[in-house]
Image (tube, helix red, strand yellow):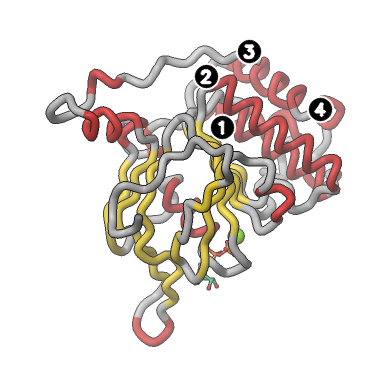
């Protein structure tokens, strides 16, 4: 599937034309000292603390860390689904908040996320319809995404008829169907065996290359993380990376106080 999409408009970069200005315009996500605290007072939980990083269209990164280290919270912040409680988070390469551009950010949620009354194909096409894509085109894109994941046989199944692993692959198809420029996947292989997990990672990497999209896979599974050319690590809400493997062509954070 090859979804036509307008190239990022770098001419819209504010400020003087220089390395920093161009780099800032190209960043899909820019985090500077970002934090998120749930609740307040004695029950406050600091889930993300002082995170600085930049996500470029070429970013292909696994964000690893133990359960509770803040991975899902950081993903929700980057997706615009949570708001920062400190620091600055912006989306220069998206030209605004992700929620204002439905379909440009593909999200695979960690937990169950299917609408129970819709079959698998309808679940995949639903966000496309919400984004204003015409019915016939939405169906075509949804079928293409399910084909990409090797799950066309699940099209007519209701969520309750799917195994957790099947539902997870439907969720990945849904995230990819609109040809996003930013793919945020939260434990996208958590319910899958090794073979199926490898196939899902292949599909995510291939889609990212095809769409020219950034790919961030949040996972606690080192086998999955090893498939990505870049690795960032979270611990206690902090982003410790980027810890890069030798082959990586990474874009380290340039904001905040980290190296
Ligand atoms: P991970 O995805 O790495 O497991 P999370 O981002 O889910 O980490 O959680 C980070 C911390 O924030 C944990 O201590 C978790 O208990 C807490 N947390 C997550 N969601 C909420 C919430 N809705 N309300 C309060 N605390 C939360
Ligand atoms: Mg999580």
Q: CA distance from mark 2 to mark 3?
A: 8 Å
Q: Which mark is residue 136?
A: 3
Residue plotted at (69% across, 52% down) = 112
On the rendered structure, is 67 left or right of 89?
A: right
Crowd rating for badge 3 (residues with CA inside 10 Å; few <14, some 14–19, many 20+): few
Crowd rating for badge 1 (residues with CA inside 10 Å; few <14, some 14–19, many 20+): many
Q: CA distance from mark 2 to mark 1?
A: 9 Å
According to the picture, the residue beneath numbered tag 1 turns out to be: 127
Which badge, 1 or 4, comes first in the chain's sequence?
A: 1
Decide: marks 4, 3 in contact (CB < 8 A)? no
Of 22 and 87, nearer the camera is: 22
Give the structural element (helix, strand or loop) at label 1: helix
Quadrant showing the N terminus: top right
Of 224 and 188, nearer the camera is: 224
Residue 182 rendering spot, x and y as whole percentages: 49, 34
Residue 147 rendering spot, x and y as whole percentages: 77, 22
Q: Which mark is residue 150?
A: 4
Q: CA distance from mark 1 to mark 3?
A: 14 Å
Q: CA distance from mark 4 to mark 3?
A: 21 Å
Give the structural element (helix, strand or loop) at label 2: loop
Q: Which mark is residue 133?
A: 2
- Cβ(mark 3) to ligand 2 < 8 Å? no
Residue plotted at (76% across, 29% down) = 149
Q: Quadrant of residue 107?
A: top right
Circle 4 or circle 2, nearest the eye: 4
Which badge, 1 or 3, comes first in the chain's sequence?
A: 1
Work out whether 36 lies above or below 150. below
Quadrant showing the C terminus: bottom left
Give the structural element (helix, strand or loop) at label 3: helix
């Amino acid at each position: 599937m090859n979804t036509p999409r307008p190239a990022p408009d770098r001419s819209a970069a504010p400020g003087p034309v220089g390395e920093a200005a161009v780099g800032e315009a190209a960043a899909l996500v820019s985090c500077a000292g970002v934090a998120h605290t749930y609740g307040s007072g004695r029950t406050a939980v600091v889930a993300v603390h002082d995170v600085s990083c930049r996500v470029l269209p070429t970013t292909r990164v696994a964000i690893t860390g133990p359960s509770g280290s803040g991975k899902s919270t950081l993903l929700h912040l980057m997706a615009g689904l949570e708001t920062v409680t400190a620091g600055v988070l912006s989306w220069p390469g998206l030209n605004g908040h992700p929620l204002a551009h439905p379909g440009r950010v593909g999200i695979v949620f960690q937990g169950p996320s299917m609408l129970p009354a819709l079959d698998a194909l309808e679940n995949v096409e639903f966000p496309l319809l919400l984004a204003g894509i015409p019915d016939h085109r939405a169906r075509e894109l949804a079928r293409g995404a399910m084909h990409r994941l090797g799950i066309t046989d699940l099209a007519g199944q209701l969520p309750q008829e799917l195994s957790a692993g099947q539902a997870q692959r439907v969720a990945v198809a849904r995230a990819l169907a609109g040809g996003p420029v930013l793919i945020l996947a939260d434990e996208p292989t958590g319910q899958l065996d090794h073979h199926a997990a490898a196939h899902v990672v292949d599909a995510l990497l291939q889609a990212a290359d095809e769409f020219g999209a950034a790919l961030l896979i949040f996972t606690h599974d080192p086998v999955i993380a090893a498939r990505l050319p870049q690795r960032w690590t979270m611990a206690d809400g902090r982003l410790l990376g980027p810890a890069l493997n030798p082959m990586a062509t990474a874009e380290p954070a340039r904001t905040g106080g980290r190296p």
